[in-house]
Image (cartoon, rainbow, N blue to C red):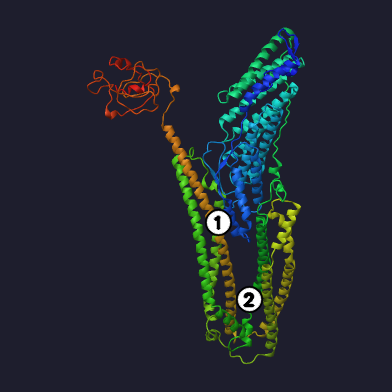
Amino acid sequence: MQCGELMPQAHTRHARCRGGGWATFSGQQTDFFLSQVLLRSALTMASNILQLPFRRSHTVSLTDAITQYISSKYDQRPDMFADDLMIIDKLRTEAINVQEPHVSGVSRLVTYAAQLKWLGGKFPIDVGVDFSWYPALGFNATRPISQNNLRFELANILFNLAALYSQLAYALNRTTADGLKQACNYSCQAAGVLNHLRTDIIPDLRTSPPEDMDEMTLLSLEQLLLAQGQECFWQKAVKDGLKDASIARLAAKVSDFYGDAGDSAVKSNAISTEWIHHMTAKNHHFAAAAQYRQSLDCLEKRRYGEEVARLRDSLNCVNEGLKESRWVNRIVQGDLNGLKSRVAEDLKRAEKDNDIIYLSPVPPKSELKTLDRASMVASKAPSQVTDAISMLGENGPLGQPLFAKLVPYAVHIAASIYSDRRDRLVNESLIGELESMTDKLRDLLSSLNLPGSLQALEKPLGLPPALVSHAEEMRQQDGLNRLRRSVQDTARIKGNDRAVYNEGVELLAAEKAEDDAARHKYGTDRWTREKSEAAAPKIYNSQIEINGYFTSAQNSDDLVERKLRDSESVFLVLTGSNRDLESYVPSSRRAAIPPEVERESIKLRSCLSEVSRMENRRKRRIQGWKDKARGDDIHPALLKETARLEREFPMQAIQASQFEDLFEAQLRLYDSDRDMLAQEWKDQEQVADQVREANKAFTRAHKGDASTKERETALQDLENGYLKYKEIISNLDVGRKFYNDLAKIVARFRDDAKAFVHQRRMEASQLEADISNVTAMASLHITQPHLRQTQPTRPHHSPTYSSAPSQPPTQAPPPTVHRPEAAPLTAPQPLRAAVPPAVQSPGPGPGMWTPNMGVRFNSAAAVPPVANAPSAAPAARGQGGTWDPSQGIRFS
């Protein structure tokens, strides 16, 4: 029964006498009334609020997973952190064992939660531990949920912290001012933890939250706890004897909180109907209490018509609350009934006085001014929760941070990000651009038939030294066989990648087929889970992207193989002996070179020598860039920047995005190299122009001489073949690197597919079991004895019985049947009763059972209990009633 609503006049000091006059209570009388109210409150208040239950977990070891992760991902040895590994397991054990409302559990939970937040900056959330937790609310509280997710573990710990605060508030003695104040504080802290969980932790979970930690459930629980905290403040206001208008504003806000909690609860799948009815009853109760208190204020201010209107509205609200009596506990019912009797009594008195004495008009409810609200509570999470990391330190209240000497995981991510950017800059923007420029220069020479035309003129007999050098290089590298082996190696890596990818695709296809078959079998009304593509869009998008990679790569592979086939005959010549080369290159018969041709050839040779020097210079430059990239170690700078961040922002989790400025500063080391590319392009344009002019003059001077034409063509083919060899080698190296990188992607895709399919099959198995259970229960037409209605007897074409007797038997059961007379069975086994021969017919008749008719059980037409005498049997037939188990089953 709510404190302060039974004896409200005890706090106003003035009450109206029966005849309409006024009487004043003494201070002792007021204290007496108040003491009676508080005494009754002390006996009942312990059960009229709700407490959150704890989530439960199994013991798991973080040590093994963290040890393995450090070994595989870090450059530090796990044994350096032996003490930290032992402490983290100890902290978890202590935290999950907090299952009783004791204040010592707060420090255990917040300490472990702070370390989990700290570990989030050191390790990825999927560190390798499957945390299993049983839901606290909902229909699946006996089915654990497991996730390899540090955030999931943190969410459960914080939920238990909120539950602990709510249970501490529940356990307090709320009959004292200190108890009410502390209970209100605990409720606000519990609401604050849930608010922090809902707004900061769950959005970063990266997975779907458990059913009892979704948005609506947490919001409803937060509003419920705020309502209970406001209720404590309201009760203290009543205890302290504040003005009725102030108490009315407090009660109105309590009603609002309960109403908001109930509105959110009906949108949740985890909050039980009992809790929803409790919130609804409390909402109406405090709406009634607010109007009742406002009516007392109207009485004091002599607004008698408004007093009557307020009391009527209060009584209506109480009646609305009493509609929930069937589902709420006796304490809440008692509060409502006590308030109703008080309101009804005051309403009767107020209406009588107003009708006889004051004759004030009673305004309708629509004209009543809406009550003001006074909110005295707010969601206030403890600083140990919201600023947990800042409280870790050498002398911090939550202890030293674990694994402090371990380089943060974000630093490794930052180093990887920088390495990718640096390699992309060097390989694409520098080396790739320079090689592209060189290819354009070679294409120019090839289009001008250089250096074949010049070599044929300068050395009409034998082999040019450059050609011999190129052929020797290819022979030493086993050129053609090397290309074939590279093609085979690339194809093997591609085949492995394709096999892994196909494994993942087949898993997804099999799961999708199983899901479609089950949906077709059970129908969409029962098979309600998402389709495969909607359940894992990222995995299916990865499948499409990887397939695109394979298609694009196959086109490149086909192009490389076509180049190899087209140039294979030239490669055979270049990798053969010098005799094969001499046989391939015809000799010319020209013995002397005219002076003009010789002069132009010398100029052209000078230009080609400049081209050769430029190519050699670029090779050295490319090698220098590669060496520079290999020696570009950003780790010292990252560690220095990390130390600065930790110094300026103590214990704040390090994020890779915080190193963007450092990346930009470090990449400025390559600005001079990019400037050099622009100069190289200018130099190349000058050399290209010189080559064109020199070749034009050479061709003009050499025009009309066809004696060296065949030799020029052969030498140029060999030169182009050598360049094609170098190009194919480069293409194959790129392809092999691509497929090696793709192997990691397809392996991750397959692993993700395996995990997804395993999860989906577990879900499908559980869903099928649930459907089977529902179907099995639906097939059982079991009714309760107290709900059974006597129905008229149907024609006696088959035996029927009722599952509960409508009246006790008139005689003792036969000696052959040993069954308790007062324990009817809901689904008894058919048993043929001992019936005298005189009652049975000699042969089948209209009312006799035969084996081909089967046995049908039906509660609509029942055989009433009869006496154990032959003369009673005919009278029993055709009469309505219920089956008596002591009589067995009579077939007639």
Residue situated in front as seen by the camera: 283 or 246 = 246
Up/down of 143 relative to 462, above or below: above
The residue that disc 2 covers is 447
For residue 829, which quarter of the picture? top left
Q: Name the quarter where the N terminus is drawn.
A: top right
- N-term-proximal mark, 1 vs 2: 2
Up/down of 587 relative to 547, above or below: below
Amino acid type, mark 1 = Arg
Q: Marks 1/2: CA distance?
A: 47 Å
Q: Where's residue 661, x and y in %?
A: 74, 58
Residue situated in front as seen by the camera: 575 or 842 = 842
Secondary element at tag 1: helix
Up/down of 153 relative to 376, above or below: below
Residue situated in front as seen by the camera: 359 or 16 = 16
The residue that disc 1 covers is 748
Residue at 46 percent of width and 47 percent of height: 514
Residue at 70 percent of width and 34 percent of height: 185
Secondary element at tag 2: helix
Q: Where's residue 210, x and y in %?
A: 57, 41
Q: Where's residue 22, x and y in %?
A: 75, 10
Could you say which disc has been placed on residue 491 in the image? none
Q: Where's residue 824, x and y in %?
A: 39, 24
Q: Name the quarter where the C terminus is drawn.
A: top left
Up/down of 139 relative to 784, above or below: below
